Amino acid sequence: MALSVLSVASEAVPFIKTGGLADVAGALPAAVAPHGVAMTTMLPGYPAVLARIAAQAAAFAPAAPAKPKARGKTKAPAGPVVLHEWADLLGFSARLLGGTLNGAADGPRVLVLDCPALFAREGGPYGNAAGQDWADNARRFAVFARAAADVAGGAVPGLSFDLVHAHDWQAGLVPAYLRFAPYGGRHVPSIMTIHNMAFQGHYGAEIFPALRLPIEAWSMHGVEYHGGVSFLKAGLEAAEIITTVSPTYALEIRDPQFGMGLEGLIRSRGDRVRGIVNGIDPTEWGPAQDKSIAANFTARTLAKRVANKRALEAEFGLESDDGPLFIVVSRLTWQKGMDVLCECIDHLVGLGGRLALLGAGDAALVQDLMAAAGRHPGRVSVRIGYDEALAHRMQAGGDAILVPSRFEPCGLTQLYGLAYGCVPVVARTGGLADTVVDANLAAMSAGAATGVQFVPVSYAGLSLAISRVIALYHQGDAWKKIQKAAMLSDFTWTQSGATYAQLYREITKEPL
């Protein structure tokens, strides 16, 4: 009998995406399905999510008869399937809608919380068009968590779950509700996954009454954190198991440098904290069949890759030569090391490299990057924003991708780089350290090198890594060996899906 898991996330592809969380939440159902796990994904009802659910309903509706009855009324178009309604969900009315994750009638199930007062607004999932967080995010995601806990506990006839998998702070209250105020008193075990410890959902104590949790939840082993409420901390305390998105990050967050104030809690959970590296979907990110790129290729047909490089040079207005083309696809933030990248651009160009960058973020960093492009026309080109298809073309055409993050729970861009033979140049931290094999002498001799690692995240560290990459690039055969080894790496969800399924079964058999 299949194990039934409710995955609760604030975003998931193909419905809504702002970062790697969406890729993971969207990929997990298919990753665990071969291992006897039926996963349902629950999302907030943002406008984009509701639009996709409505489109599904229209697609699944029966076809209209060729000739309507003369005296009959025309049947209204099918709307989304309403599975449940709340008259008072922490003070709000809401509906639970049903659909599928991939749009196929038999695809993995998706549940959507339709609460217009909280989610029907223009802007992003977490803030307005100006990038400011919604002032009521605490209420928004508390209501979402309460609904998910109700669903997990059996509020909806016909829906039953053995386990809840909550992702990041937006779903952090789900394990807390399951522990302190379970629907119908039914205990449902939970996993809390940290995708980035830096985002914790910390709010003032005044929101606690609105959560409708019992007073015993206001404690150091509940939702209270430094006199306020921390959604992430609540989940980390209440969940049976904590996972992070790489083994190295699971170790790093025990240290103050990476634990962001929660390192003591993480240490206290001992072996209940696990690290499982993310994967990518090779049907979405695979150069052999990618329709976004100029020329398809494989590890055996690397020569075809040059057509993508020339196309990328033209698209970014870069000079075409035989030197390496570096790419960056990133949020432009301090965490991602973009300030250090700015310091190293002149060094990169001075050694014959070129840079194509796609990203958005801190205004000061954008200004510095645009200034670098102005200093080096034809050698540095910057696109502000995000374009998924362009990201594919960059991975297919770039020679190396720079990922100088100060901390990186897992990271996906380096995995895309591996898949496309765009050699990752990564800081030795978190999932970057777990997924990229440094091109040191031993790894090169064994044919195992897949990229370049460096420390520290500073001008000295990154500039030396860039110098190493350029030297390796001009060694021809050595560079091709790195590219081939990268492309032959197992960067899919195969192993991670099996590991998650094993963990789900462990939890359902062994309560905390």
Image: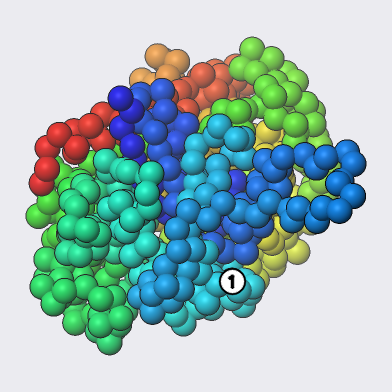
Residue closest to the far bottom: 206
Query: Which quadrant would residue 85 be assigned to in this image?
Result: bottom left
Q: Secondary structure under badge 1?
A: loop
Residue type at mark 1 is Ala
Label 1: how many residues lie within 10 Å, few (<14), some (14-19) or many (20+)? Answer: some
- Nearest to the observer: residue 245 or residue 114: 114
Residue pictured at 33% horizontal, 56% vertical = 155
- Nearest to the observer: residue 347 or residue 276: 276
Residue 489 percent across, percent down from the top left: 47, 22
Residue pictured at 76% horizontal, 53% vertical = 75
Query: In this orientation, does residue 67 appear?
Result: yes
Residue 233 percent across, percent down from the top left: 23, 64
Q: Is residue 273 left or right of residue 124?
A: left
Quarter of the image for the N terminus: give it. top left
Residue pictured at 47% horizontal, 31% vertical = 30
Query: In this orientation, does residue 437 appear?
Result: no
Q: Against 146, is 452 above or below?
A: above
Residue closest to the far front: 71
The colour scheme used here is rainbow
Q: Which residue is mark 1?
A: 120
- Nearest to the observer: residue 148 or residue 310: 148
Residue 232 percent across, percent down from the top left: 29, 63
Query: Which quadrant would residue 50 be assigned to in this image?
Result: bottom right
Q: Against 106, is 229 above or below?
A: below
Residue 298 percent across, percent down from the top left: 65, 18
- Nearest to the observer: residue 215 or residue 78: 78
Residue pictured at 55% horizontal, 23% vertical = 487
